[in-house]
Image (cartoon, coloured by chain):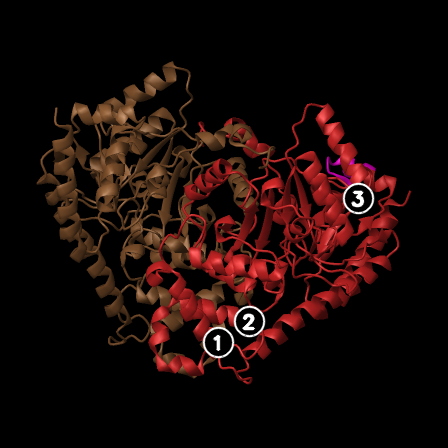
Chain colours: A red, B brown
Amino acid sequence: MATNVSVENLNPKVLRCEYAVRGEIVIHAQILYCNIGNPQSLGQKPITFFREVLSLCDHPNLLEREEIKSLFSTDAIIRAKKILALIPGRATGAYSHSQGIKGLRDEIAAGIASRDGFPANADDIFLTNGASPGVPYYLDESSGWGLEISELKSQLEDARSKGIVVRALVVINPGNPTGQVLDEQQQYELVKFCKDEELVLLADEVYQENIYVTNKKIISFKKIARSMGYNGEDLPLVSFQSVSKGYYGECGRRGGYMEVAGFSTPVREQLYKIASVNLCSNITGQILAGLIMNPPKGYPMHTGQAGDGCYDLYKEEKDNILKSLCRRAKAMESAFNSIDGITCNKTEGAMYLFPRIYLPQKAIEAARAVNKAPDVFYALRLLDATGIVVTPGSGFGQVEGTWHVRCTILPQEEKIPSMISRFRKFHEEFMAQYRD
Amino acid sequence: MATNVSVENLNPKVLRCEYAVRGEIVIHAQILYCNIGNPQSLGQKPITFFREVLSLCDHPNLLEREEIKSLFSTDAIIRAKKILALIPGRATGAYSHSQGIKGLRDEIAAGIASRDGFPANADDIFLTNGASPGVPYYLDESSGWGLEISELKSQLEDARSKGIVVRALVVINPGNPTGQVLDEQQQYELVKFCKDEELVLLADEVYQENIYVTNKKIISFKKIARSMGYNGEDLPLVSFQSVSKGYYGECGRRGGYMEVAGFSTPVREQLYKIASVNLCSNITGQILAGLIMNPPKGYPMHTGQAGDGCYDLYKEEKDNILKSLCRRAKAMESAFNSIDGITCNKTEGAMYLFPRIYLPQKAIEAARAVNKAPDVFYALRLLDATGIVVTPGSGFGQVEGTWHVRCTILPQEEKIPSMISRFRKFHEEFMAQYRD
């Protein structure tokens, strides 16, 4: 046994680190993973066009071969050539600029500008290995804050009165774990609040393609800020995007970016320095980030004529995934609401349901007796009984005295009825055992 | 201007962070990058077999098509199928296990076992986005330590007498920036030293394929430790490997692993937890890490008959790259040694030369006058005059009062003569200007 390295002498920050979605629950886990937004692990297929382009960029010699015309869509071939031309020396195996390949950042900036109707600058884009590593959350988080500005304001004043320097507000829209989509008015108020209170607005917008209601739309916080006349200089804002979510769900490719606007040059230089330490994010993820922000836009893409079929296939795959997610969200929401002792909010966007579990006092005491939070206790019992893995709500700062689990809407549709019936059976037995 | 985020109120750790190879020099940089080991940016081609496999894994539908037989080698097709079978659900777009795909870790462990002749365990492998993010260097480094054990010992005692808790020794073999390859006896002594002093041995072995002398060989520290009869439990050891170096040079793919041996279960669980926070490393990098540890091993690979040509091509590409690196190392070393006021050690391995520059006192004073370290001043002047980017030695803890630059051996061979003549001309003019 190594006597010099033990849990006792590890950096205490390592021991304190907790990550709700991959903690104790997962170490026991088998079977149906509803704890994490990982669509392709549950059978979602990647978008063909994106994978065609990656495949060609990985092995550029293919582009010189006539035979590829029968294997790849013409648009994918054109796009791969275009991307390779953006990469210095066509070297997809070289470290890139620390912020990511300049040509891809240009593409992404163009995609953002087209989404928002306001300009975006490639120098503001930092490509990342997914959205997780972008900003380590040294910054103060908004956990437990409601959506009423008055409530936010009172939380902020409370923190400040305790001597806490609050520097930033993190807003996840659409929400994780709650699945809510902010309405435009709320977004205006949040931006105004950050401006007035001199807070950096950290906008986690990785679910910007995931919306399941028709009466709302997803608007980027940058667009909101620009619409209000705030230019970069008066509202520091960071927007996060990832290739892991949306209809693409390319979690394993670890691609994403942050758009950093409204910071002074010296602060930007510090950000650049930190980005440099890890050299650059992976090139496959960089290419994918460029693709999701500039997907096929409709035929004719290259010939001026319809009929290549690439756009049709892309559109069909995308629509099928999003429509299916929408059906799954509704099916699971109404199923949860049909179970006694569970209520479930409507999922307007993102990939999660956050059902509230009304635990009897005896269950809470049983959990305490084994030194577990009640929702962790419930989730572990659920796992043991059914093989369904969910994430306990206590990792997300739920309101004191309430208990939730986070459950993704990602199980394939044909598996949902049996999943729900196993869940229901477990829940009824659990409640019967601990009835007050 | 954002008044709430300024350099003054950033986390001081961010401001203190310095990264030698991507600092001030690079912000001015153009032209010939000899500052960083980035082979493909200077024209090195990727290994065809590896890229064939990646291309097929990115777009697995190709494997169902007859036409691929004329585009991909049979061995690449077989290997891609084998890799996809290792990935749960063949989902190359899903988050994997936090340590990396189990089947790929099995492959890597088998590759290590075959390299060392001692067993390796997939549970000890943590796949990473390159080798840089594996362990943030919170640990004490061995900077400036020589190779004499007596010197190491006195440095250690000196540190301990100051109350510094020294937990680990970092050894880079082959060396960066010095290009030295340790001999076997030195390795035994280092392992014994770590064992006796209860230090964790962090072995940066990313250059394990890069050796340019015939009288030495590269032996992993794990093999050394096992040969000495130390099993995992009595010598905690971490070995780092990366897809960025060797003959493959796939820097942009951000693949690598660390093999973690000899830590207690609770410490391993903490490592696992930290790995989980970033979810997983990118799948392309994971696949590549599996490939470099299990490259084609000789024909017949699949048919039992020679003649497929895949192994021949692989072997030819690999040998050409390594032989060329060897020629470049020798050519640049003798060129540096032919310049007055420069001496250059022999590069036995890795990718760098570390020539010592004998700066005149007047140059040192001129540097101090503009508040620069003398080698930074020299490197900036070199860059201005020639477009050649090197890394100042002061980032690597050189001996007090000596000045070096680190220069990669990666410029393409045909560019070396003109590079050296530009370097020589600059150096002579610089020395003439500052002659004491």
Boundaries of the magenta span: A365-374
Q: Position of residue B99 (x, y in %)?
A: 50, 49
Observer-nearest of A193 and B320? A193
SS for callout 1: helix
Give the Cα distance between marks 3 and 1: 49 Å
User: What is the three-letter code of the residue carrying label 2?
Assistant: Pro
Give the Cα distance between marks 3 and 2: 43 Å
Q: Dot 3 surroundings within 10 Å: few (below 14), some, or many (20 or more)?
A: many
Q: Is residue A314 left or right of residue B342?
A: right
User: What is the three-letter code of the residue carrying label 3?
Assistant: Trp
SS for callout 3: loop
Q: Image quadrant of residue A103?
A: bottom left
User: What is the three-letter code of the residue carrying label 1?
Assistant: Asp
Pick the quarter of the image with the C terminus of chain A. top right
Earlier sequence position, callout 1 versus callout 2: 1
Q: Position of residue A265 (x, y in %)?
A: 49, 39
- Whether label 1 touches label 2, CB < 8 Å: yes
Labels 3 and 2 in the same subunit: yes
Q: Position of residue A48 (x, y in %)?
A: 53, 72
Q: Is residue B275 left or right of residue B348?
A: right
Query: Which residue is denoted by mark 2 in the rendering?
Result: A296
Give the Cα distance between marks 1 and 2: 9 Å
Residue at the extreme front of the image, as rendered: A229
Query: Which residue is denoted by mark 1 in the rendering?
Result: A75
Query: Which residue is denoted by mark 3 in the rendering?
Result: A403
Q: Position of residue B315 (x, y in %)?
A: 24, 64
Q: Determine the main secondary structure of the stretch shown in magenta.
A: helix
